[in-house]
Amino acid sequence: MRKLIILLLPTLILAGLFFAGKIDFSKPQLTLKDVESIGSEYTLHLKAEDRQSGILKLKVSISQNSKEVSIYSKESENIKEITENIPINPKKVGLFEGKATLKVEATNNSLIKRTTVYQKDIVIDLTPPIISIVDWTRNIINGGTGFVFFKSSEPLSDAEVKIGNYLYRCLDFTYGYVCPFSYPYFEDGYLPLTLRVVDKAGNKTLHSLNYSLKKVNYAKSVLNIDDNFIETKVRPLSDKNIPDKIELFKYVNVTLRKENEDTIHRITSECKNKEPMFDGYFTYLENSAKLGGFADYRKYRYNGQIIEGADAYHKGFDFASIKNTPVKASNKGEVVFTGFLGIYGNTVIIDHGSCVYSLYSHLSEIYVKKGQKVDKNTVIGKTGTTGLAVGDHLHYGVLVEGIEVNPIEWFDPKWLDTRFYTPLKQLKGGQ
């Protein structure tokens, strides 16, 4: 028996070490984005993990001309996962422009010390991209749309326009970049406009762009609501049983409105179709009168008292004609949403490309489906009173990168030609 125990002891010890994670035949896992080049300010996003024995050592180095430079090194006892964002400044560590080799090594804490190595020939690139701005919108209204058109000396990993604290992506075409943006309708002061681009190595270039802001004083109004409106229009939209009529209206007009608009903003921020599908100016409901205006600020009065906390912006135009008037697509595009959308009622959203969308709400009928391509003036439905609508009408909106903009510009052939079509042709090189 004693001999048997002596014979089994090494096996038992090894088994114990194995189950304790000290004998680990697997290698650590390394996760990082494949690196092609490193610029003057580059961040290496890195994760190393070993769920059994843990990570003992993690090391990052760069070799250039037979010289190895240590970038990062960490030793630990039994950390199962290390996630790091490692800043790399080539100049500070004595690297220069040209070819180099990046090496990442992760060693686990097993008795047999297994190592995973990521090694890649890279380029140290310390030169920021050179940007040639073809054109940009120099006259902007609050609530208006603008564009920046530019070319780059090299491929970019990121490009965006920033106006104040609002960011808008730039679209990468084979012939250059187009950056649609909007000046928020609720802002009323001059906001700095900048173009920021980043190349594949992480080098950045910034351009400040001057423009003139023309202030539009949008309407302010007070709308009266009564018991009939609350019971026939507001209450059916609520998913909560709220007896108090004022609280019910506030819930629907504020909370549910935000939920509905968050859905609209999410859909119209996708920018799935980069190339513009629209052609010429945008059309609106034929033989109609414009009732509600864009960015009207509305308060609501019930039984002679203003309802505090129920204010809302009207983010489009209301067009009214005869009952159940056919509604046509205002330009070419792809239908990206159809269905009931709370206070907006039956709604259609069309993607026109280049992050430009149009919205049609309160419809009585919908004739198109999601994914369907439509031409300008394709009948997509009929006007109605669905949602939070008083009287038969169409709520029409235009959104750029998920933000509502003043549709009036998109109805203007001259505005579209000078702000978009002519600069786009110049960007293409006169093609």
Image: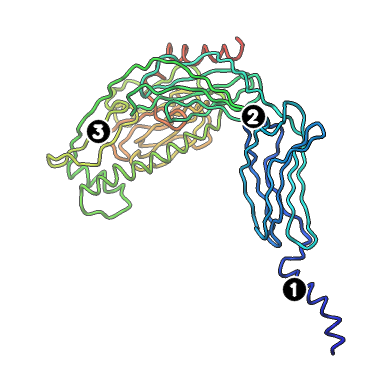
Q: What residue type is disc 2 on?
A: Ser
Considering only vertical position in the picture, is 194 above or below 52? above
Q: Is 391 on the left or on the right of 154, as rendered?
A: left
Q: Is 266 on the left or on the right of 315, as rendered?
A: right
Mark toward the start of the polypeptide (1 vs 2):
1
Please give the label number shown on residue 40: 2
Say which quadrant the C terminus sits in: top right
Considering only vertical position in the picture, is 21 above or below 277? below
Nearer to us in this view, 167 or 390:
167
Q: What residue type is disc 3 on?
A: Arg
**How much space separates mark 1 and mark 3, taking CA atoms?**
73 Å
Please give the label number shown on residue 348: none
Q: Is 416 on the left or on the right of 361, as rendered?
A: right
Mark toward the start of the polypeptide (3 vs 2):
2
**How much space separates mark 3 and mark 2, taking CA atoms?**
51 Å
Find out whether the residues at labels 3 and 2 contact each other: C-beta distance under 8 Å: no
The residue where tag 1 is placed is 16
Farthest residue in the left direction? 304
The residue where tag 3 is placed is 298
The secondary structure type at the circle numbered 1 is helix
Considering only vertical position in the picture, is 177 above or below 265? above
Q: How is the image coloured?
A: rainbow
Rendering coords of residue 253 (x, y %) = 29, 42
Q: Nearer the viewer, mark 1 or mark 2?
A: 2
Considering only vertical position in the picture, is 356 above or below 347? above
Say which quadrant the N terminus sits in: bottom right
Mark toward the start of the polypeptide (1 vs 3):
1
Q: What residue type is disc 1 on?
A: Gly
Rendering coords of residue 33 (x, y %) = 67, 40
Rendering coords of residue 255 (x, y %) = 32, 45
